Image: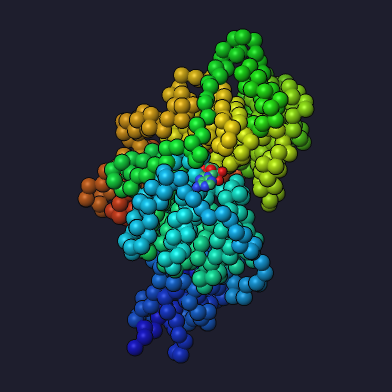
Amino acid sequence: MTPDFAVVAVQIGSAFASDQLFHYRIPSGMICTPGCAVIVPFGKNNRKITGFVMALAEESPVPECKEILSCQGIMLNAEQMELIKWLRENTFCTYYDAIRTLIPAAAMKNTKPRKKQNFLSMETLPPLVLSPEQQAVFETIAPALETDQPASFLLKGVTGSGKTAVFEALAARTLALGKSVILLLPEIGLTPQNVQRFESRFGNRIALMHSRLSDGERRLSYERARTGQADFIIGTRSAIFAPLKQIGLIIMDEEGEHSYKSDASPRYDTIDVAKQRCRYHGAVFLPASATPTIERYYQAKKGLYHLLELNHRYGDMPLPSVEIADMRQERENGNLSEFSRSLHDALAENLRNKEQSILLLNRRGYHTIISCCICNQPVYCQNCSVPMTWHKTDQLLHCHYCGFSQPIPAACPICHGTKFRRMGFGTQKLEEELSSYFPEARILRMDADTVSKKNAYAENFEAFRRGDYDIMLGTQMIGKGLDFPNVTLVGVISVDKALFSGDFRSYERTFSLITQVVGRGGRHSKSGRAILQTFIPDHYVIRLGAEQDFEGFYAQEIPLRKVMLFPPFCDICVIGFTGTDEKKTAASAELFMNCLKLALQNHPEKLPLRILRPMPFIYGKINNKYRYRIIIKCKNTKQFREFIRDALKLASKAKETSGIHIYVDMNGSTSL
Ligand code: ADP
Ligand code: ZN
């Protein structure tokens, strides 16, 4: 006897606490199993909606049970069903949010994908010969590919050590064993050469998955992975959900990049999903970086990852030599420009030698602050508690959070003063200053304003590689992963601000950015140098970043994390509250404190907890939504998640929280 009822997940909002499954009767003769997509009547008007069968049941808790209208067949396999439950359990999302993440909307539509193409014929690349150091790493990992036991390795390889070649060799071995591969990259537009290289070697076994695909392309990639036509997936965060069978290897390049953490429901960290899938498939997990996160490195030292290192650049090129330019000294000497003497001279020399330079400045726009000369208040966005940035291109103030723009106001909204001071400099101003010093230089500016078009990244990088430009200046999008043979000078204009962003990860992010951008230089036959400009030359992050000394940085950072109680010594659970009414949003956060206290009473077992009282986020309003948070330092266990779930249920019943969106974010950013 097959059960008569199906337990169905439908889309009815995104609040975790109100997420529930609905029972439907399976009409006689209909074949319906867990994983099937079904059309069901819903609500008072019985509108037809799509649902997914999560389980079957012998009975229904309600006597009057509606019937399934039609069954579309199986859309979710057994692993996907497990992943959905895992996502819901671990990220506090709804069933439907989890399902939507696994099956892209485009693939849900019940139409045949158009077959047109994502294919280059396989070029004959020269056979890959690994350096002895690369070979040693390969040989340590390779045996683990042959077993069905999960294994985790952490590859720490200095910039230019040739991590990609190791990935290539491992991928080839995995495919030869009849297993499939996922290669994750933080941002696919940034590494077109890498992707091309893989495509030339592995041809149409590859499917790409990233956010810049059209719906049709996305659906095609999904189908090719599902049917086994593609068994090598290259992509960004969402590619971790590729519906592959028999995964043998998951590589995560530049692990720790924050694009790997989803900041909308489901708020998963790609690394957790990767580990989960490797456990399921008995696969090898390989996160890699020149600067692993403090958390990962700590775990590797504790033996949770087998630590592997590439300590030399491919071809034994030296790492770039780095000079710190003390900008306080420059100012004292009367140099008011954004370029230190030494960076100016080095740029001039590079232009003479026809070698290329890269300049990093992590702020776009022209002036980053416009403030009233009388009350000193910056001009804020009308929708956000964020100071606006002036752009020279359209002579308008822009909000980089909600996109709002306006002219500089006639009068200060606070004191009605009519004079404004223009301060701070972004990439536009830097470009202007640079071309005034070097009128003959061909300058490529790369920031969110210049590369909004779909292929602009790739085209610009290609043009720079060809030598169409002398200097590339840009925000952190140029900082990582790129490999240009003719770059011999890297200038870091300023990263001082990034150190104090208010997030406990700001030091490691800044350290990583410095190390990585410095590492863009001198990767081939010419040696490289870098100049790091700063007003805080004695800060250990700046000093160790300049020395590219990861071990030294780790040794400084880990005791700080321990004393301050931050990961890896605890988990950070952020409860976020957003709403259009500030008082109500704040009140919901206060109320939630009580819910936490009540929920704690149901959990007599010892939960190690430290709850920090409600506060606005650093940007307390974005897009007219007020934003509050509670930070809980905890240990992310099943019991802890149950406790949070109990508190969410209590809060959702209180009338004070109506209209307030409450979410839970595990180990995400504490500042955004
Ligand atoms: P990383 O990602 O570790 O910074 P890359 O993978 O970009 O370094 O490699 C740096 C450079 O060295 C690239 O130009 C790459 O093509 C070259 N390279 C690395 N390993 C090999 C190899 N085994 N054979 C040929 N070229 C290599
Ligand atoms: Zn705004």
Rendered image quadrant of residue 570 = top left
Q: Quadrant of residue 494?
A: top right
> Where in the figure is residue 585, as x and y percent of width and height?
49, 44
Give the residue at the far left of this rendering.
Answer: 605
Q: Residue at x 41, y 62 (%)?
A: 248
Q: Is residue 478 above or below residue 194?
A: above
Q: Nearer the viewer, residue 15 or 317?
A: 317
User: Could you tell me how many numbered marks the image carries?
Assistant: 0
Above or below: residue 297 compared with residue 32:
above
Left or right: 206 as drawn, with respect to 598: right
Q: Nearer the viewer, residue 415 or 185?
A: 185
At a point 61% along the width and 31% down the height, the residue shown is 488
Residue 652 point in image, percent of width and height: 42, 55
Residue 281 shows in this picture: yes
User: Which residue is situated farthest in the top direction here?
Assistant: 333
Q: Position of residue 145 (x, y in %)?
A: 37, 60
Task: Name the image colouring.
Answer: rainbow
What is the quadrant of the N terminus in the image?
A: bottom left
Q: Determine whether 361 is above or below 326 in the image.
A: below
Rendering quarter of residue 5: bottom left
Name the side, left or right, on which 256 lies relative to 364: left
Q: Is residue 150 left or right of residue 417?
A: left
| Residue 195 vs residue 45, the one in the foreground | 195
Residue 369 coordinates in the image, percent (x, y): 64, 27
Say if residue 256 shows up in the picture.
no
- What residue is drawn where x is 61% and y is 40%? 484
